[in-house]
């Protein structure tokens, strides 16, 4: 199991910059010294709405850190009322956040095969950057799955590794999913890091099992409280959880990153 760090704080962060980088995809930079200093790739923030009718925070992955400006980058798709509210923020606004939350990826000096789909791609940017800039490994291959030709973050990820693309509509790269790319890849003692929609993660887990390779999978399970209290985010595990005595783990506090062989990925 990947250990959770316990350094999160609740605070008001200042919005530095916000822009739309693809239809309904927002690129938001906020400023917080404590979060910028303590974040691991794969951790996330719980972001609170100003509208008090929306009490529950929205979990958004930390996409990138810029320690020079204490900046934290979040990339999110506008899907409902919370993300719509965040998309209307402006530079200078303040926003209530709790974080960094979760365990994050465990970085290992092995060839990295990084696999992301849709809104699972953002946390893979800081992961790729750290693997490369801290010289953890120079062998980085990144497989990205998109719906269409709005290839957000692709060019930035190309700075850190060789990027392969699959699109559902076939407009760029391989037509289909990341699995269509993976089927033709040679693996050499790689470690998989992955984040994306559940069907993709299930396919990645099976792929890793068949080839007997280690995979770290970041689950984007539906959440409510974000602090381990409500059990809205449990996923099934092979082992019995020592706190609850059942085959469950809470993605918000025990994850979001798990070794693929620790968890069951249901429908
Ligand atoms: C660990 C983690 C990291 C995430 N990182 C990103 C990211 O980097 N970029 C991004 O675009 N999206 C990300 N998501 C998904 C994002 O949290 C949801 O899209 C967002 O909460 C939707 O809120 P809403 O109010 O706009 O939508 P609504 O559908 O109105 O939300 C209603 C409620 O359901 C919860 N909810 C709805 N969809 C999800 C979901 N997929 N996951 C968790 N809770 C959900 C909301 O938090 C809220 O409490 C992440 C989810 C998790 C669990
Ligand atoms: S969201 Fe409440 S326990 Fe995880």
Image (spheres, rainbow, N blue to C red):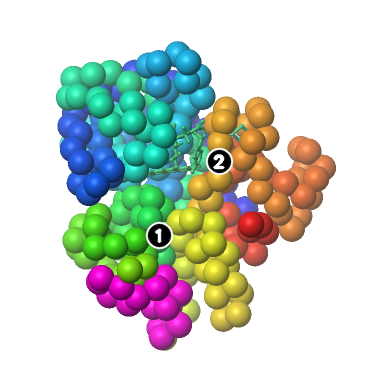
Earlier in the chain: of badge 1 and badge 2, it is: 1
Of 130 and 264, which appears nearest the observer? 264
Residue 140, how many percent across, how many down?
33, 70
**How many discs appear?**
2
Q: Is mark 2 within 8 Å of ligand 1?
A: yes
Q: Is residue 161 magenta?
A: no
Q: Is residue 184 magenta?
A: yes
Residue on which disc 1 sits: 117
Drawn side of residue 192 relative to residue 202, left or right: left
The structure residue drawn at horizontal position 62% and vertical position 40%, both measured from the top left corner, is 233
Would you say residue 141 is visible in this rendering? Answer: no
Q: CA distance from mark 1 to mark 2?
A: 17 Å
The structure residue drawn at horizontal position 31% and vertical position 39%, both measured from the top left corner, is 74
Which quadrant does ligand 2 occupy?
Answer: top right
Residue farthest to the front, as pictured: 169
Task: Determine whether the residue tagged by mark 2 lies in a helix, strand or loop.
Answer: loop
Drawn side of residue 42 relative to residue 215, left or right: left
Residue 216, how many percent across, how many down?
52, 60
**Within 10 Å of the Cα at label 2, are there few (<14), some (14-19), or many (20+) other Cα atoms?**
few
Is 72 rendered above or below residue 235? Answer: above
Is 253 rendered above or below residue 206? Answer: above
* Residue range of the region highlighted in magenta in the rendering: 170-185
The structure residue drawn at horizontal position 41% and vertical position 34%, both measured from the top left corner, is 80
Drawn side of residue 243 relative to residue 69, left or right: right
Task: Determine whether the residue tagged by mark 1 lies in a helix, strand or loop.
Answer: strand
Residue on which disc 2 sits: 222
Of 6 and 265, which appears nearest the observer? 265
């Amino acid at each position: 199991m990947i250990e959770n760090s316990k350094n999160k704080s609740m605070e008001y962060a200042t919005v530095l910059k916000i822009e739309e980088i693809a239809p309904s995809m927002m690129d938001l930079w906020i400023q917080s010294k404590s979060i910028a200093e303590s974040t691991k790739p794969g951790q996330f923030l719980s972001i609170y709405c100003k509208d008090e009718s929306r009490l529950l925070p929205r979990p958004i992955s930390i996409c990138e850190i810029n320690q020079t400006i204490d900046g934290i980058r979040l990339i999110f798709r506008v899907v409902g009322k919370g993300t719509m509210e965040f998309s209307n923020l402006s530079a200078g606004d303040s926003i209530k956040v709790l974080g960094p939350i979760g365990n994050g990826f465990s970085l290992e000096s092995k060839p990295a095969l990084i696999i992301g789909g849709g809104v699972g791609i953002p946390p893979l940017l800081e992961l790729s950057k750290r693997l490369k800039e801290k010289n953890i490994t120079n062998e980085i291959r990144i497989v990205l799955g998109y719906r269409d030709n709005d290839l957000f973050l692709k060019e930035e990820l190309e700075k850190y590794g060789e990027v392969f693309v699959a699109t559902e509509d076939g407009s760029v790269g391989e037509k289909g999913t990341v699995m269509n790319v993976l089927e033709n890849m040679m693996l050499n003692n790689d470690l998989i890091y992955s984040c994306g929609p559940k069907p993709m993660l299930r396919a990645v887990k099976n792929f890793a099992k068949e080839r007997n390779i280690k995979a770290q999978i970041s689950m984007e399970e539906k959440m409510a409280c974000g602090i381990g209290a409500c059990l809205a985010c449990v996923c099934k595990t092979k082992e019995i959880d020592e706190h609850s005595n059942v085959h469950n783990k809470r993605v918000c506090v025990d994850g979001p990153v798990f070794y693929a062989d620790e968890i069951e990925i249901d429908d």
